Image (cartoon, rainbow, N blue to C red):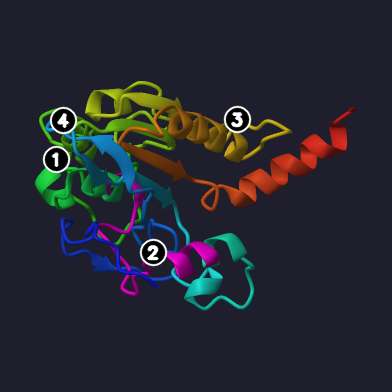
Amino acid sequence: MRTSSLTPVASLPVFHRLRPGEALAVLGGLLLLLAAGPLPVRAAAGSPEPVRSIVFILADDLGVMDLGCYGSDYYETPNLDRLAAEGTRFTQAYAAHPVCSPTRASILTGRYPHRLHLSSYIPGNEPPTAKLRGPQDWIRYLRHSETTYAEALAEAGFATFHAGKWHADSEYAGDQNPGKHGFGTVQPGRSPWQKQLRDPMAIGEYTDALFQFMDKHKEDRFLAVLSLDQVLVSALTDYHMMVCLMSWQP
């Protein structure tokens, strides 16, 4: 197993320890940045220099032991196991918050959720019977004054791409707002209530868009973010798939 020259975790806050299935996880509770390189590009002086591109796969609610490479003897994940074996595997899983929106905002900015004043899932709707009450003055969006890693990489010359769930503000799917935070190409996510029979979880839609972006920029440095919520909505999806299959006529 090689050691990556990238240090993706070091720039993030000291996160709270995840518990299986509780919080937003990044491929089993980890941030996996995949170095797709080196790619030959020309420096200003005309000499080739090695550069790396980044593919960041973010998965909602994936438990820390839901992958074979992290100890699961129930779920079979051969492709991710191979990815872990051929790359770098982190063994301490952290997240900035136990729910989605603050964690996403923290990952995007490298800042604690309380510094962003974004401290609950958007829109919130705390149950009246909650034993602990969260802050009442938090904001329900990622401020445009915050600098994201996508903006920093774009400024450094990287092409940037985002596919799938956004939910760092009122846009769950991210139709427009990822483009306002540094992502030059955006494949919007899909509401968990919008199901299509042939691609009910939008895996094909997102990955096709990802591959098209990577092919287009294979000679460039790029950042590609694939943001998945399929674990989060799997129960809903299974139900809707059953209904669709029972009524489908080929």
- The Cα atoms of the two marked residues, 2 and 1, are separated by 29 Å
- The residue singled out by tag 1 in the image is 137
Circle nearer the viewer, 3 or 2: 2
Q: Which residue is drawn at the image coordinates 39% and 30% (left, top)?
A: 217
Question: Which x, y percent locates residue 211?
Answer: 51, 35
Residue at 38% over, 46% down? 55
What amino acid does circle 2 point to? Answer: Gly
Q: Secondary structure at mark 3?
A: loop
Query: Between marks 3 and 2, how big is the CA–CA gap?
Result: 27 Å
Crowd band around label 2 with a 10 angstrom C-alpha radius: few (<14), some (14–19), many (20+): many
What type is the residue that disc 1 sits on?
A: Asp
**Does label 3 or label 1 sit earlier along the sequence?**
1
Estimate how packed mark 4 is, as few (under 14), some (14 to 19) or many (20 or more) residues with alpha carbons within 10 Å: few
Residue placed under numbered mark 2 in the picture: 29
In this rendering, the answer to whether 154 lies above or below 20 is above
Residue 155: which disc?
4
